[in-house]
Image (spheres, grey):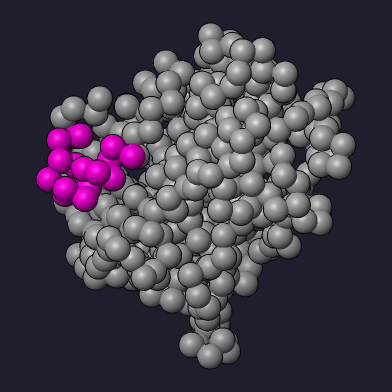
């Protein structure tokens, strides 16, 4: 019998465990290793950061859920991966051996690449629930003495959607508090144009997002490289299409949230044949590492090349739909290997996103994610906010039950029909 290990228990790792459990043979063992004993629904972090949610609203204690599924659980951080000997060393001093490994760690947040960036510096973050909690405290203090706000995503970032979301959510909250008129807002991004999203745009995301920003009196700076952050001041270089620096600006702020660049976690970096120079895991079309055939990877930790060159580096996002399709393909392929067959399932690397703006939002579908595409659709409206709330409720319910149903697969079919997506608002199940 075989031992299958899932390293990480975020969006990808948790549903990976659920789907894998259904593909194992009697007698096979499944273990989940993660540094955080609780799962947090990351898409809700922007709401936590303005006190629309509390961390307890979006967290799940993993141990009892996994135990009900017959899945072993080790809440300890990995410190070293030895793919030559199929072992993982953990922070608690133990080690775990495996026959098959699925890497689903998510990213390491590279705040250190820019002086003063991040929650230990002078800007806030919504990448982790603990960051969002800290941002909520800072936001409450800011509202007592409002001033300029600077939001956005720095060079090398690959997850631009949450930056747009949080900017508009904050703008909505400021209007509700009747202090919006005291707060100039600027969006600073590495993208070559608004709505690029690391995907070279989807449908009319450029027009939709620029229009929303004009209507909400938000200024923007594109092709921008953050040089450093000091208390109350962001220093930004503006880069021309030829890659040369056209000028430098200092942007004052009373509150700032800048998404960082991502990289692979330290135990995975520098392993020849497993990871690229940024530490992201290399995979083939079956989600399997080309060198270490018993290692698979899903989610944000997977290495994906950018859509094309940009004046300032922009990564490619891994949306929920893409991650779920990676999970399903990986579970099927490991199930085949356990039965002496070769992998044949491939993920559908498509993008489906609901970007909430607090009282409205933008939705888009890109199939495939990298252009040219068969489907290139975007839309906006108040229904997107309702759909995002319904999705949160649905997904947390699914996680608590320990089910592996792929919601995004359903959602995509609805989006392609366009009309049915709005029904999710009233019936998330």
Q: In this view, does 388 lie above or below 360?
A: above
| Magenta extent | 409-425
Q: Where is residue 126 in the image (x, y as percent from the top left)?
A: 49, 45
Q: Where is residue 316 in the image (x, y as percent from the top left)?
A: 50, 61
Q: Where is residue 315 in the image (x, y as percent from the top left)?
A: 54, 64
Q: Where, quadrant-wise, is the C terminus in this rendering?
A: top left
285 or 241, which lies in front? 285
Q: Main secondary structure of the magenta part?
A: helix
Determine the residue positioned at 33% across, 58% down: 366
Determine the residue positioned at 20% across, 34% down: 424
Q: Does the magenta stretch include residue 95?
A: no
Is residue 8 in sight in this rendering?
no
92 or 365, which lies in front? 365
Q: Is residue 120 left or right of residue 271?
A: left
Q: Is residue 298 left or right of residue 82?
A: left
Residue at the farthest front position: 340
The quadrant in which residue 200 appears is bottom left
Q: Is residue 324 left or right of residue 388?
A: right
């Amino acid at each position: 019998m075989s031992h299958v290990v899932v390293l990480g228990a975020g969006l990808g790792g948790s549903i990976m465990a659920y789907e894998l459990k259904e593909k194992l043979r009697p007698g096979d063992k499944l273990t989940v290793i993660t540094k955080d004993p609780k799962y947090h629904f990351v898409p809700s972090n922007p709401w936590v950061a303005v006190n629309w949610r509390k961390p307890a609203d979006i967290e799940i204690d993993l141990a009892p859920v996994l135990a009900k599924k017959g899945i072993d659980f080790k809440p300890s951080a990995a410190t070293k991966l030895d793919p030559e000997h199929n072992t993982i060393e953990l922070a608690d001093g133990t080690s775990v051996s495996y026959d098959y490994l699925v890497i689903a760690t998510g990213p390491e947040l590279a705040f250190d690449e820019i002086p003063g960036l991040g929650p230990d510096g002078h800007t806030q973050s919504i990448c982790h629930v603990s960051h969002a909690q800290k941002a909520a405290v800072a936001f409450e203090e800011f509202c007592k003495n409002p001033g300029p706000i600077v939001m956005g995503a720095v060079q090398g970032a690959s997850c631009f959607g949450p930056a747009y979301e949080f900017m508009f959510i904050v703008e909505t909250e400021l209007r509700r508090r009747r202090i919006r008129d005291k707060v100039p807002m600027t969006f600073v991004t590495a993208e070559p144009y608004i709505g690029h999203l690391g995907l070279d745009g989807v449908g009319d995301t450029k027009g939709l997002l620029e229009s929303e920003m004009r209507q909400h009196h938000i200024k923007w700076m594109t092709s921008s490289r953050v040089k450093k952050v000091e208390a109350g001041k962001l220093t930004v270089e503006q880069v021309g299409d030829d890659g040369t620096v056209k000028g430098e600006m200092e942007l004052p702020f009373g509150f700032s949230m800048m998404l960082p660049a991502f990289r692979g976690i330290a135990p995975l970096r520098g392993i020849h044949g497993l990871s690229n120079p940024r530490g992201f895991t290399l995979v083939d079309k079956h989600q399997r590492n080309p060198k270490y055939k018993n290692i698979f990877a899903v989610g944000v930790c997977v290495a994906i090349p950018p859509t094309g060159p940009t004046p300032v580096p922009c990564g490619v996002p891994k949306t929920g739909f893409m991650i779920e399709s990676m999970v399903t393909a990986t579970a099927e392929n490991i199930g085949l290997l356990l039965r002496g067959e070769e992998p044949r399932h491939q993920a559908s690397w498509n993008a489906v996103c609901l970007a909430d703006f607090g009282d409205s939002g933008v939705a888009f579908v890109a199939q495939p994610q990298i252009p040219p595409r068969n489907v290139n659709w975007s839309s906006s409206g108040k229904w997107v906010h309702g759909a995002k709330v319904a999705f949160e409720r649905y997904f947390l319910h699914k996680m608590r039950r320990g089910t592996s149903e792929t919601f995004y697969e359903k959602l995509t079919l609805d989006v392609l029909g366009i009309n049915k997506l709005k029904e999710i608002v009233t019936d998330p199940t």
